[in-house]
Amino acid sequence: MLIAAGLAILVAMVMATIRGLKGPTIYDRILAMNMFGTKTVLFVAVVAYLYERPDFLDLALAYALINFIGVLAVLQFFQNREARQAARTAQAVPLSGGEQDGASS
Amino acid sequence: MIALIGLVTLTLVAVAAIATVMATNLFVASMWFGIFSLLMASNFFILDAADVALTEAAVGAGVSTVLFMGALALTGEKEAIRSRVSWFPMAVLGVLALALFVATFQQPMLGDPMAPVHQHVAPWYLEQTPNLINIPNVVTAILASFRGYDTLGEVIVIFTAGIGVLSVLSFKPKRRQTISSEALAAKVRGVQHHSILRVVGKLVIPLLMLFALVVQFHGKYTPGGGFSAGALFAAAVMLYGILEGADRSAKAMPEKVMLRLAAFGATLYTSVGLVCMLLGGAFLDYNVLWPDPVVGQYFGILLVEFGVGLTVTTVLVMIFNAFANRPTY
Amino acid sequence: MMEMIVDGLSWLLLAGGGFFVLVGGVGVIRMPDLYTRIHAASVTETLGTMLILIGLMLHSGWELATFKLLAILVFLLFTGPVSSYALGNTALLGGLKPELGSQDPSKEGRDL
């Protein structure tokens, strides 16, 4: 049954990748990354027991923590985009020749 | 069974790599890079390399994503569109890829006990570690003791990378009048107004730091060691910076202190080697640190791994603070 | 006898967990809108995780690894819903509108 659970988790990882490839908006891709991270945690836990080496569970714990931080970093960047652009364009001194601001999104 | 899992994950690695390159929105590309890193960590895990998997996940999916977000906040998200395709570099790459592909058929099979790499040094390490060093994690024994000189080089490289990033980022733009970092942070208190995220996130930070310390000091018994512990501790500080504002994390971990601690970590490693020389042995020969050589190895590994962890943590925190506190490019 | 019950229970929990992970995966692909996809993904994060990890805990017995699994479970249960909330909130604040059904009154009595 461990093998079946492992295969189910692999299939879910493939499905998350498909959503990441297809997803029209950026949020679909963030969702795919988050789901991928949690599936990796489960995958590591199940395969650690398949290999009969339970001391590999430290990896699963580390991945769970890291996944959370990655998603929060992405979301914080996203929420601050508008505020940062407003701060940038409010302070930019106009130059001759129309210097292009790199953050035109 | 393992072959099937390996096949699926390697296919997904190829898909993620192609998706990373083909994405024009750099934001999407950095997220695909995070997925790629998690897949590589799963691959390393299947191949029974737990230390590498831990470090790859901590650095690639955690720290790298945060640093890429910091860099994208300064530059912009759209990739510049190339209007013409250069054929000559693609042809060179195609020839190289074909050569590498043909060369893989000459390699021994994965896990073949008769392969040359398993015949000379590897059995010696595996047989002699219980006699000479007596710790269960052979990877840490090789990294910190048998090949300690190479690891010293790695620590110096990390320190140099930190100095390089700081020197590049210390170039202040002259033409634009920028707002101070406190004013910017006050405007962009990103996730700070979400009480749920702050409460739960703050519960995570001490756990993560504790786990990083466990990984650091248990590196002899479980997968871990200085590099992964450093990345995890830096990830905890970055989480604090994300939740509370980058200016607060810069105040909590000021750059001057971090710089000195990074230098101290590399110096600690070198001084252990020098002390070994002063006590009569060779450079980084831990046997002379204590009357019992095995205990001497134990102390030597403890000290140098601590130096490694310290340098990695402080360099990553310095880079994060430098990126996140910069108002514009 | 006791081991057989525990083994059988662990088997059942792992099978259920695998099933819910698959359901969530299919949901993420087939759901029409981001918000419904977040809901589908959160099924795998909470229910699938709980069943699989509790099944693994029963499989391993009274060891240190069981407490590590418990720590992983508690941790994922804390942070999984929070990540989904953060994503949904960011999407809503970023202007992504949820796809609501048609408000056509002629279709009102159709769902059983």
Image (cartoon, rainbow, N blue to C red):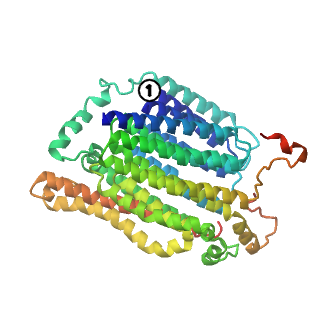
Label 1 sits on a secondary structure element that is: loop
Q: Mark 1 falls within which chain? A: B
- Quadrant location of residue C6? top left
Q: Residues within 10 Å of mark 1 (few under 14, many from 20)?
A: few
Q: Nearer the viewer, residue B270 or A33?
A: A33
- Quadrant location of residue B92? top right
Of the 4 image quadrants, the one containing the C terminus of chain A is: bottom right
| Residue B33 in sight here | no
- Quadrant location of residue B88? top right
Q: Indicate the position of residue B269 as horizontal and vertical percent values.
A: 29, 60
User: Horizontal placement of C7 versus B329: left or right?
Assistant: left
Q: Residue at 50% of width from left, 57% of height from top?
A: C78
Q: Nearer the viewer, residue C7 or B251?
A: C7
Q: Residue at 59% of width from left, 61% of height from top?
A: B70
Q: Identity of the amino acid at label 1?
A: Met
Q: Check disc 1 and report the residue beneath it.
A: B1
Q: Residue at 45% of width from left, 26% of height from top?
A: B3
**In this picture, is B268 found above or below B223?**
below
Q: Indicate the position of residue B29 as horizontal and vertical percent values.
A: 63, 47
User: Horizontal placement of B163 versus B154: left or right?
Assistant: right
Q: Indicate the position of residue B167 as horizontal and vertical percent values.
A: 52, 66
